[in-house]
Image: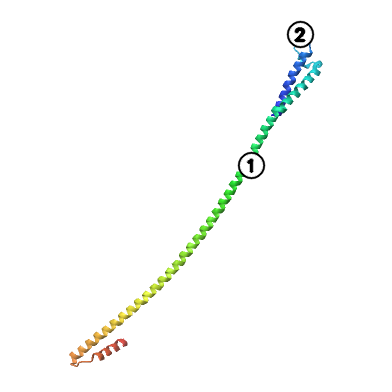
Amino acid sequence: MIKKLAVSSFLTLTYATQSFASDKNHVPTHNDVSHGESSGGLPQLDPSSFTGQTFWLIIIFVSIYIIFSRKSLPDISRAIENRAERIKNDLDSADRLKGEVTSVQDTYEKRLKKSHEESSLIFLKIEKDIKVKSEENTKKFQEYSAEKISELEKNIDKARKDAMEDMSQIAADIATEAAEKIIGVRADTKSARAVVDSLYKAA
């Protein structure tokens, strides 16, 4: 940008200086006017005016350079430096944000992995606890069932014995009454009971 501006200014000043120097160093005559009107040539291409053109070109170029170097060029340089600094700051901010995003993502992935591991451990512990409780309950139920079955068997056996005793007593009474009615002899109840019990044992 600065180079283009300097080149454009140089070319413009060159053309203006050459025209100015040619007009100043050349005093037109009637013949020159007539010749100029007829030929239409460029006065800045006249070799006799090159020295003056070069002098004024140097003076004007140096003046413009001093003006640009003290005012315009520092402003442009500051603007370029400020823009470069903003770009650098933006890039630094982008890198910092990228690093923060990466850090947050890594933290999220680590916490997610940790949560999965903790969940797996919790499920395993729950499954183990359920299995242990199930085994304990099964064992308690088996013990309770065995106890109840044993108690029931005892009750059944007692009921059977009681029923057998009742039946033996009834059979002894019937046998005593039958003997008394048939043969007219009153049999002893205990003896009849003993005979009935021996018959049950033999059966």
Q: Which residue is mark 2?
A: 33
Front residue of 77/113: it is 77
| Identity of the residue drawn at 39% across and 72% down | 144
Q: Indicate the quadrant where residue 181 lies.
A: bottom left
| Identity of the residue drawn at 73% across and 22% down | 11
Q: Amino acid at mark 1?
A: Asp
- Classed neighbour count for the residue bearing mark 2: other residues with Cα under 10 Å, few (<14), some (14–19), many (≥20): few
Q: Quadrant of the C terminus?
A: bottom left
Front residue of 158/109: it is 109
| Identity of the residue drawn at 59% across and 46% down | 100
| Identity of the residue drawn at 29% across and 82% down | 162
Element carrying mark 2: helix
Front residue of 160/178: it is 160
- Chain-order first, disc 1 or disc 2: 2
From the top left corner, tell me how far across and down residue 142 is, in percent: 41, 72
Q: Which residue is mark 1?
A: 92
* In the image: residue 152, left or right of residue 67: left
